[in-house]
């Protein structure tokens, strides 16, 4: 069986389109039936509409991509009114990725989503924390613990916390999020990187640093998912450089309950469809009846 359960939600398969790379699904539906997906993680949502960062936002690098989009999104109200009804038509799990600049913004966003038809909230704790000198919630374990605990206390949906690979200690971060009530974890988000224009003699991005994703980060992401899966007793969704079904199987073998596909969607818009088919064919060839047979065997 290729279907999996995540926080009590039945997914048709373990393949989820990652937040920030799939919009709300409509654009990709012209390339393949996105109802085939296990789930869709929405573009990062904030309580108020955000225009995102100025200047260059995406820059290709060897084996990957740097982005500094800045959480551009329509805001929670427009999402509920305009995007959510369309997402419901796809008949796949809806994961609302939520961000914010401070705890009050996170709380307001979650409260607004509590009674809407979404399956899981994915809490992006890699956003700037304006009350901690610009530190991201996802860097310091103690800060993350307090933040997740507050959100969990008012969240009516299963809460999946998205971890940053830039955390001071990724395993301790996972422990703390677990202790504060997270129902699942997803990792990894982008690595902190940068690029320089040697002709203009300046950084490519206005914010200097940006998030690195794509095939280049897969070995590090795989290692972190393995470490976290061995350390916690809640489901883990793995991501980071997944570009083919073999990559997806690797993440499942190190313990991931499901996987998310991000940057690869830009390379081949129907790559998720290929990965789903690849996993099914692999299971047939290997005589695997259920993914639980290989999950966490490494």
Image (cartoon, grey):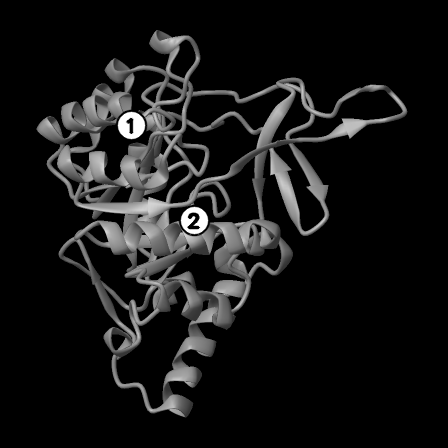
Q: Is residue 203 above or below residue 35?
A: above
Q: Position of residue 72 (x, y in %)?
A: 49, 27
Name the front one of labels 1 and 2.
1
Q: How busy is the neighbourhood of tag 2: few (under 14 within 10 Å), some, or many (20 plus)?
A: many
When asked about the image quadrant of residue 160, the answer is: top left
Q: Which residue in the structure is indicated by mark 1? A: 141
Q: Is residue 11 left or right of residue 206?
A: left
Q: Can I make out residue 151 in this image? A: yes
Q: Is residue 262 above or below residue 45?
A: below
Q: How busy is the neighbourhood of tag 1: few (under 14 within 10 Å), some, or many (20 plus)?
A: many
Q: Position of residue 19 (x, y in %)?
A: 42, 43
Mark 1, secondary structure of its residue: helix
How far is mark 1 from mark 2, CA to CA?
Answer: 24 Å
Mark 1 in CB contact with mark 2 (< 8 angstroms): no
Q: Which residue in the structure is indicated by mark 2? A: 18
Q: Earlier in the sequence, mark 1 or mark 2?
A: 2
* Labels in figure, total: 2
The numbered dot on residue 104 is: none
Q: Is residue 296 above or below residue 291?
A: above
Residue name at image x 33 percent, y 91 percent: 287
Residue name at image x 68 percent, y 21 percent: 55
Point out the image quarter for the C terminus. Answer: bottom left
Mark 2, secondary structure of its residue: loop
Q: Position of residue 112 (x, y in %)?
A: 20, 26
Q: Is residue 244 left or right of residue 63?
A: left
């Amino acid at each position: 069986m290729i279907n999996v359960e995540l926080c009590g939600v039945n997914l048709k398969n373990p393949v989820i389109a990652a937040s920030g790379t799939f919009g709300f699904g409509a654009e990709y539906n012209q390339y393949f039936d996105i109802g085939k997906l296990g789930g869709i993680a929405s573009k990062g949502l904030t309580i108020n509409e955000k225009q995102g960062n100025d200047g260059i936002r995406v820059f290709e690098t060897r084996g990957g991509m740097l982005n500094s989009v800045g959480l551009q999104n329509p805001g929670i109200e427009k999402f509920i009114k305009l995007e959510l009804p369309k997402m419901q038509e796809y008949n796949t799990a809806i994961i609302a990725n939520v961000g914010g600049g401070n705890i009050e913004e996170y709380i307001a966003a979650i409260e607004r989503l509590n009674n809407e038809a979404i399956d899981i909230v994915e809490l992006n704790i890699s956003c700037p924390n304006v009350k901690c000198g610009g530190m991201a919630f996802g860097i310091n374990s103690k800060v993350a613990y307090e933040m997740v605990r507050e959100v969990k206390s008012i969240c009516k949906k299963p809460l999946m916390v998205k971890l940053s690979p830039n955390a001071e200690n990724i395993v301790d971060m996972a422990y703390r999020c677990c202790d504060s009530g997270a129902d699942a974890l997803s990792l990894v988000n982008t690595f902190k990187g940068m690029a320089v224009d040697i002709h203009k003699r300046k950084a490519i991005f206005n914010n200097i640093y940006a998030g690195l994703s794509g095939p280049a980060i897969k070995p590090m992401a795989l290692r972190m998912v393995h470490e976290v899966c061995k350390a916690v007793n809640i489901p883990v969704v793995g991501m980071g450089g997944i570009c083919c079904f073999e990559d997806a199987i690797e993440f499942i073998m190190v313990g991931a309950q499901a996987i998310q596909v991000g940057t690869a969607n830009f390379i081949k818009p129907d790559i998720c469809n290929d990965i789903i088919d690849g996993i099914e064919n692999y299971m047939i060839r290997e005589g695997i009846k259920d993914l639980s047979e290989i999950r966490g065997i490494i």
